[in-house]
Amino acid sequence: AQKITQTQPGMFVQEKEAVTLDCTYDTSDPSYGLFWYKQPSSGEMIFLIYQGSYDQQNATEGRYSLNFQKARKSANLVISASQLGDSAMYFCAMREGDDMRFGAGTRLTVKP
Amino acid sequence: EAGVTQSPTHLIKTRGQQATLRCSPISGHTSVYWYQQALGLGLQFLLWYDEGEERNRGNFPPRFSGRQFPNYSSELNVNALELEDSALYLCASRSGTGVNQPQHFGDGTRLSIL
């Protein structure tokens, strides 16, 4: 069964607007971590933001925030004030113990 | 602090040859992970090494193998190369065992099989 699901293969957003990238996960472990990574066309994977399963507040890192809805098992990434440099693949990942699983990714294109 | 480094950046081989990819983790990180990413696709987990031992491997044939050295650097070896092995191979390292520790990735090695 798929542990991490990203249902949006591609997304478009106008420069300076906000965009939400969806991620749902499946686990029965009460302790887990959720991560988002950005992969530009050059290939490197850049760690963006982390949310722990016990965290009470949604994680934020600059223009990135994570909309964590534990009961719905969703961990959507919100990018505010999109910039052209945000165009990239975005991967959601979940760690349970030593096991880390990645979603299929969402390709975000920011339009000028 | 230096990040995860991978070499070579690009590697071109022909079918049937053998390829060796190298990875140096961030200083202090003992876990190294290898992933294969075919063009336009997601990351497929290959291997995980920690403290010099193979801890887990993904659903790949035995011709994909590797090792971790005492300094925690790692090698990925691919024998009897096939055309479908063409991909970006990403190495990641991690510190500690908690679920809150992210993996930090290198820039990858692009392996092309002609």
Image (cartoon, coloured by chain):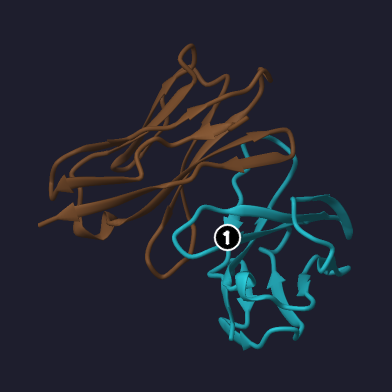
At x 37%, y 32%, the residue is A22
Q: Looking at the picture, how far across and down is residue B8, in whole percent? A: 62, 83
**Residue A15 against residue B73 in the figure, above or below:** above
Q: Which residue is disc 1 drawn over?
A: B105
> Does B91 sit left or right of A60 as displayed?
right
Give x and y (percent) for residue B76: 76, 71
Evaluate whether residue A23 shows in this view.
yes
Position of residue A83 measured from the top left corner of the image (x, y, whole percent) = 20, 54
Q: Nearer the viewer, residue A61 or B6?
A: B6
Name the residue at 51% across, 39% down: A35
Dot 1: chain letter: B
**In cyan, which chain?**
B
Location of residue B31 with respect to B72 vertically, above or below: above
- In the rendered image, what is the letter of the chain coloured brown? A
Q: Secondary structure at mark 1?
A: strand
Q: Amino acid at mark 1?
A: Phe
Q: Quadrant of the C terminus of chain A?
A: bottom left
Q: Quadrant of residue A40?
A: bottom left
Residue located at (54% from left, 63% from top)? B38
Viewer-closest of B10 and B63? B63
Structural crowding at the residue carrying mark 1, measured as other residues with C-alpha within 10 Å and reported as few (<14), some (14–19) or many (≥20): many
**Residue at the extreme left of the image, as rendered:** A112
* Residue, far top: A71
Q: Looking at the image, can residue B1 be seen? A: no
